[in-house]
Image (spheres, helix red, strand yellow):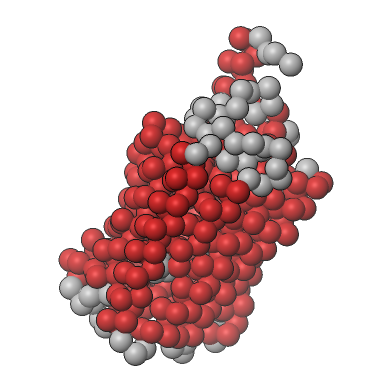
């Protein structure tokens, strides 16, 4: 059904409002969980966990934080209950302020995993709803705009812990403060639901993307699986922040109180890069994905050094890669899947992403205890394989 020019303009305005409001929701959510993410490694270490334990906990948390999305995504596609599942996931942010009462690393790990599970539950619904809105503005730019707003919270959250460490010398007060943004996240999410109860209508009656003409007769096209394979390999070599932070604390590369600040800097870089890479993606398409392994490689050499300057550069690169992953990886997925399979596609894709985080996190945690040189070699080999996977994916794209 054709829509009138006035209806098209109104839809575009509503889509922009939806992205901005959801960006506010994500910002408060990020204040909560990214603030905690900035100190997970040192906090678990403070409670007695070893480097290998931190690698395992971070890996399991990361895996569940994505694997559960498979179930969530299928459920969303079947029931169309986008908002119910999304808000339910945001309610699980209470696990973060509850970390204040953790008396040992096992309890803290349980809360950490619970928080990651909540993110997994809400993400397919959130990403699917955003994908409908971004079609009105350009998928790259739309996801980039949302990611930039999202990262404002990711910048503020770690600074709360920097303040907590500076004033009290401990983490618990920082976790207690997180009750405020956690509650605000849920309240604002309910408001956005009231304003846009059916985001799917924002994409309906739009022409198919010009970036890629996929045969949508299939549930998930072959190019989706090649894209997932490339993602799996490149993420396999992406060091998680907890293991990097543990290295900074264990080797005393920088003062412990500065680690959350360094994470905040990474989130600021993430926000800036998100807008740039989003616009770039809308102009040049899938070729922009090659920037992920290119920027991941030097993190291996710089992030595990004992030079504070090199470490700062590594963390900034880490933030840039996060910005790229959170923006164009989601945007590309929206451009190679149909509207009716979007939730399932995000669920499967994020499960594969999470599996890569799990394997990579556990591997790097164990390898760190033997030799930093082994970590560098591991990352280099994996990212070189990612280049090969990208070439195969790109050839398939060009053949469409």
Residue 7 percent location from the top left of the image: 65, 14
Q: Quadrant of residue 97?
A: bottom right
Say if 44 sits above or below 177 in the image.
below
| Residue ID at (55%, 29%) | 209
Quadrant of the image for the N terminus?
A: top right
Give the mark count: 0
Direction right: furthest residue = 79
Q: Is residue 214 visible?
A: yes
Residue 110 percent location from the top left of the image: 61, 77
Say if 93 sits above or below 1 in the image.
below
In the foreground, 107 or 19: 19
Q: Is residue 43 visible?
A: no
Residue 399 percent location from the top left of the image: 50, 39
Q: Quadrant of residue 16?
A: top right
In the foreground, 51 or 17: 51
Q: Could you tell whether 206 is left or right of 139 in the image? A: right
| Residue ID at (61%, 23%) | 207
| Residue ID at (20%, 77%) | 306
Q: Could you tell whether 207 is left or right of 141 in the image? A: right
| Residue ID at (23%, 75%) | 305
Say if 245 sits above or below 130 in the image.
below
Q: Could you tell whether 170 is left or right of 1 in the image? A: left
Residue 44 percent location from the top left of the image: 47, 81
């Amino acid at each position: 059904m054709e829509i009138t020019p006035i209806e098209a303009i109104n839809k575009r305005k509503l889509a922009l409002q939806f992205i901005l409001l959801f960006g506010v929701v994500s910002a408060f959510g990020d204040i909560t969980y990214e603030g905690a993410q900035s100190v997970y490694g040192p906090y678990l270490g403070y409670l007695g966990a070893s480097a290998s334990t931190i690698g395992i906990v971070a890996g399991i948390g990361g895996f569940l934080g994505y694997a559960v999305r498979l179930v969530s995504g299928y459920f969303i596609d079947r029931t169309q209950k986008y908002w119910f599942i999304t808000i339910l996931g945001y309610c699980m942010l209470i696990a973060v302020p509850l970390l204040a009462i953790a008396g040992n690393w096992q309890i803290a790990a349980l809360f950490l995993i619970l928080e990651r599970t909540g993110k997994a539950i809400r993400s397919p619904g959130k990403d699917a709803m955003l994908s409908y809105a971004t079609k009105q503005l350009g998928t790259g730019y739309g996801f980039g705009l949302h990611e930039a707003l999202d990262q404002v919270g990711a910048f503020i959250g770690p600074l709360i812990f920097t303040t907590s460490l500076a004033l009290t010398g401990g983490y618990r007060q920082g976790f207690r403060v997180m009750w405020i943004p956690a509650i605000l996240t849920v309240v604002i999410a309910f408001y956005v639901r009231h304003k846009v109860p059916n985001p799917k209508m924002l994409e309906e009656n739009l022409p198919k993307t010009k970036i890629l003409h996929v045969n949508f007769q299939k549930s998930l096209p072959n190019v989706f699986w090649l894209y997932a394979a490339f993602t799996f390999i490149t993420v396999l070599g992406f060091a998680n922040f907890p293991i990097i932070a543990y290295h900074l604390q264990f080797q005393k590369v920088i003062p412990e109180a500065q680690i959350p600040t360094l994470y905040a800097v990474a989130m600021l870089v993430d926000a800036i890069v998100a807008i740039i890479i989003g616009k770039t993606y809308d102009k040049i398409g899938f070729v922009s994905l090659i920037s992920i392994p290119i920027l991941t490689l030097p993190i291996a050499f710089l992030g595990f050094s004992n030079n504070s300057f090199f470490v700062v550069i590594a963390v900034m690169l880490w933030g840039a890669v996060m910005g790229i992953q959170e923006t164009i990886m989601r945007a590309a997925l929206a451009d190679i899947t149909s509207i009716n399979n979007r939730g399932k596609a995000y669920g499967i894709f994020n499960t594969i992403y999470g599996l890569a985080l799990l394997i990579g996190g556990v591997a790097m945690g164990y390898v760190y205890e033997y030799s930093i040189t082994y970590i560098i070699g591991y990352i280099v080999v994996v990212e070189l394989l990612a280049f090969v996977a990208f070439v195969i994916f790109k050839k398939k794209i060009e053949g469409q």
